[in-house]
Amino acid sequence: MAKSLRSKWRRKMRAEKRKKNAPKELERLKKILGTKADVIMEEVKEVATVLPPEKVLEQRDDCKMELDNKRNKKTLLDQHGQYPIWMNSRQRKKLKAQRVKGKKKSKLAKGLVW
């Protein structure tokens, strides 16, 4: 579920809101902790770290998974001839039509066979 345009947009905007409000939330947390904030923050650093989004994205790029199935980038078919699970039937039909159209060759002219 949750594949409609509206839900995708909402998810995207919630993520933007989280990024925007992260510094405010951190300041509020420090304020709540009060004067003992430095002592407690040292303990919290062991449990959770607050990183800027750029560093998180860099870390994610470093640890890419090795997948066994290889996909053709043009047709999106894997080595078994299967489309990705997220692709709907209309998209599959459209890509298949393009593939078949490319394979068709002109028919030989009918004539006498010597």
Image: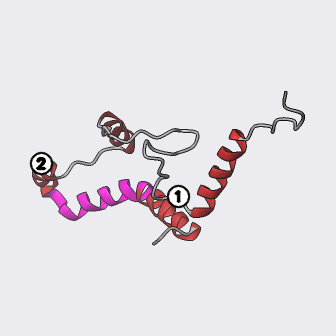
Report the number of discs.
2
Dot 1: within a 10 Å radius of its alpha carbon, few (fewer than 14), some, or many (20 or more) residues? few
Q: Distance of mark 1 from mark 2, alpha carbons?
A: 42 Å
Query: Looking at the image, is 112 positioned above or below residue 101?
Result: above
Q: Quadrant of residue 29?
A: bottom left
Image quarter where the C terminus lies is: top right
Q: Quadrant of residue 18?
A: bottom left
View extreme (top): residue? 114
Q: Identity of the amino acid at label 2?
A: Glu
Mark identifier at residue 46: 2
Which of the two discs, 1 and 2, labels the residue nearer the N terminus?
2
Q: Identity of the amino acid at label 1?
A: Met
**Residue toward you, 65 or 19:** 65
View extreme (bottom): residue? 1
**Residue toward you, 60 or 35:** 60
Q: Secondary structure at mark 2?
A: helix
Image quarter where the N terminus lies is: bottom left
Query: Looking at the image, is 65 positioned above or below residue 97?
Result: above
Query: Looking at the image, is 70 positioned above or below residue 12?
Result: above
Q: Which residues are magenta?
A: 19-35
Residue at the spot 30% in from the left edge and 56% down from the top edge = 26
Q: Secondary structure at mark 1?
A: loop
Query: Looking at the image, is 14 positioned above or below residue 81?
Result: below
